[in-house]
Each structure stands twice: as C-alpha cells, then as structure tokens.
Image: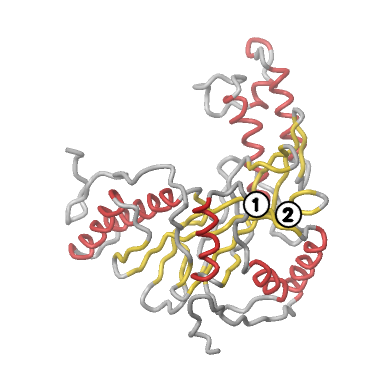
Amino acid sequence: MDRGDAGPGRSRPMVVRVPVEPVEAAVEADAVDAVARAGEVAVRGPLFGVAAQGPGDGPRWRVVLAVADGCPQQARDGLNSRLWFRAKDEAEDRAERRDLLAAVARLESERVDELVAGGTRYRIVRAEEYAGAGPGGIEEPRPTDPEPPVPDWGRDATEARLDDGLVLDPEAPVTPTQALEQLALRGLHYVGERFPAAVSADSRRALDTHPDVLLLPPTFAVVEQSGNGWKPVSGPHPTAHAARRSLDFALTWAWPRMRGLIPVGTDVHADARSRAAGGGAHADRNAAELAAYADAADRLRAGRVNRLEFQGTVYRIARTRRLLRWGPDGPEGPRPSDVNTQDPARIHLPLDEDGNVLPED
C-alpha cells in the first residue's frame, strides 16, 4: 500500500525506529517497564484543542491551542480569540483583516469545527484522554519523565506551555513501544450501558472514518482516590512538577479560601503558611487548621512526591495520555454526540478594517 492511499477503514503503515541514542533508549526501556506495571487502560473522556494546516504543511498539522479543553466550544472560543488578536495586531492589510474578522463573526454565532482564515486551515480536534492502570492504581510519572534540576515552587514560575510547537505528523517514525500502543488502541471505543446510544455509535463509527491513532505527548494531572477509582482534581499539565505545583497552590491558597479559612478578598499574597505563622496581633483564629494545610504542602515539597494523603483523601500525580484519531483528511474533529457546555458568543469588542477597537454600541 502506498503511504498516501489510506481511505476510510484503512490504516496507514507505520515506520518503526529502534532508539539507539542513550537517553532515547532509557525512555524506551522505561516504557517497557511501565507496561508490566500498568498494563490496563483507564479512559476518562475527550479533550479538545485547535490544529492548523498551512499551504506547505503537507499531511502535517500544527497544534496552535493545546488539546486540553473539556468541550468543543471552549476550543472554538479559543480560536475566536486567537483570530481576533491576529486581525488586530498582525494583519498586513484590510483584505486580510476582513478575512480574519469574517471567521471571527462565524465563530461568534455558529458551532464551527473547521474554517479557513488568513490562508490557514483551522480545525477543532478531539483526543481521548486515558491513563495506564494496574494493581498499584493509576500510573504515576516515570523515572525518565522530565523534571527540573531545581524545582521552582513560585506562583509566577514559567514553563513550557502544553503542546507548544507540537506537530502532528502521521508519517513520523515511532518507537517499538509507541507502535505497540498505537496498534493496541486502534480499536478503542466506548462500550457498556453507561454510555448513551449516540455516544457509542459515534465511537464505533470513528473506527472506520479515522482508523489510525497518534499519541500526543504525556500530560500530568492531580487526581484523588474516589471509591475504587480516581477523580481528576486538576487539568493536564506539561510536567509532573507543574502538576505538583498546582496541588501546592490548592493546599496553600485556593482551598483555604474556598473552605472559609482565609476570607475571600484577603491580600492576594496571604496563604496558609503566612496566616498559620502569624502571631500576636496577627494571630489567625484558623491558624491550627491552616497549619495542617501548610504541613501537607511542605510534605509535597520534600522531593518528587507523587502520592499525598491529606484529611483522609489520597491525592496522586497521575501520568495521563491522549490518543488522537486520524483519517484520510487528518485529525478527528468533534463528534455529533460530544457535549458543549456553552453557546457561541462574542468574546471581544468589534474591530474596524484598520484594526481599531470599536465601542460595543
């Protein structure tokens, strides 16, 4: 079969490359060990983002908005905002600006999953989020997953954005474990009575319309143990440390405010540590409870901690993965049964043809 003649229900051939460089070989060996530890798959559900394809990209697509949104409309709104700013700040002439603003107008009123603007093709893309699981529960970060040499716990710490610069290339070589995972997951679809009939039908149909799968880079999330399963506490992060830092922020800043231990409206720099340590005139009546939150955060900072128990709940840093289905025309978009939690709406003020922001009226 030629590489380019994959049609509905037909899969592309894969090029498998055995890693020989030491770091790549270590990552591959780590992946083999992970299969032995966590050989099952726990599927959470879909995530959405935006990919773009330019005239010279061939079969490749570039992720321009991370595949991390919980519903398609959130991704459409993100594209709306991206095109508005492109029209405002980057358009070279009135014709290009009109073209971009026409796309913005559609996104403000329609559930658009694909459009062309400024010479670029944009698509809302859909990926399935899942994680490895085994006797020890949901998979934690692997030893070869990237970690900072010196962890930065500051709230203003900078890091690479999720999916930044990611290219989706169906012809890119894969390692043996990646090939095995892709082959094993080609037939993944929803089954069971807990899924509505339309959801199950769309899932089965995708096996024919988008028979191939691409594996996106791993992500990391905070989850909490709930019965026999795990419930997400945070969204996906690009590194395990970023997920830990989000849990640290929840323990010291967000949860104390949500639970009434620090009044809403208190100075933004106040947290569980500072309020628990204040004495004398600055003593806090919730100091003892806040000290428990600070202590949990300190235990989290003790090292590369991936499991933390606090107030009877077990939290874990989970290594999550995303599977994107691929068909003859590229990555899969939203399915008819995917749920939108919001309607299209105007996000920004109008622009004129010269890029000037106009009043709402």
Q: Percent position (x, y) of residue 301?
A: 74, 40
Q: Amino acid at mark 1?
A: Phe
The residue depicted at 64 percent of the width and 48 percent of the height is: 221
First in sequence: mark 1 or mark 2? 2
**Image quarter (top left, top right, bottom left or bottom right) of the C terminus:** top left
Who is closer to the viewer here, 302 or 28?
A: 28
**Spatial CA span between label 1 and label 2:** 8 Å
Above or below, 276 relative to 62? above
Q: Percent position (x, y) of residue 284?
A: 65, 14
The residue depicted at 60 percent of the width and 60 percent of the height is: 189
Asked if marks 1 and 2 touch (Cβ < 8 Å), the reply is yes
Above or below, 254 relative to 161? above
State the SS at label 2: loop
Q: Percent position (x, y) of residue 246?
A: 62, 41
Q: Is residue 27 left or right of residue 187?
A: right
Where residue 220 is drawn, which disc sits there?
1
Q: Residues within 10 Å of mark 2 (few under 14, many from 20)?
A: many
Where residue 268 is drawn, which disc sits there?
none
Q: Which residue is label 2 attached to? A: 141
Quadrant hosting residue 143: bottom right
Q: Is residue 67 left or right of residue 316?
A: left
Q: Amino acid at mark 2?
A: Pro
Residue sitting farthest toward the top = 281
**Image quarter (top left, top right, bottom left or bottom right) of the N terminus:** bottom right
Above or below, 163 relative to 12? above
Who is closer to the viewer here, 328 or 269?
A: 328
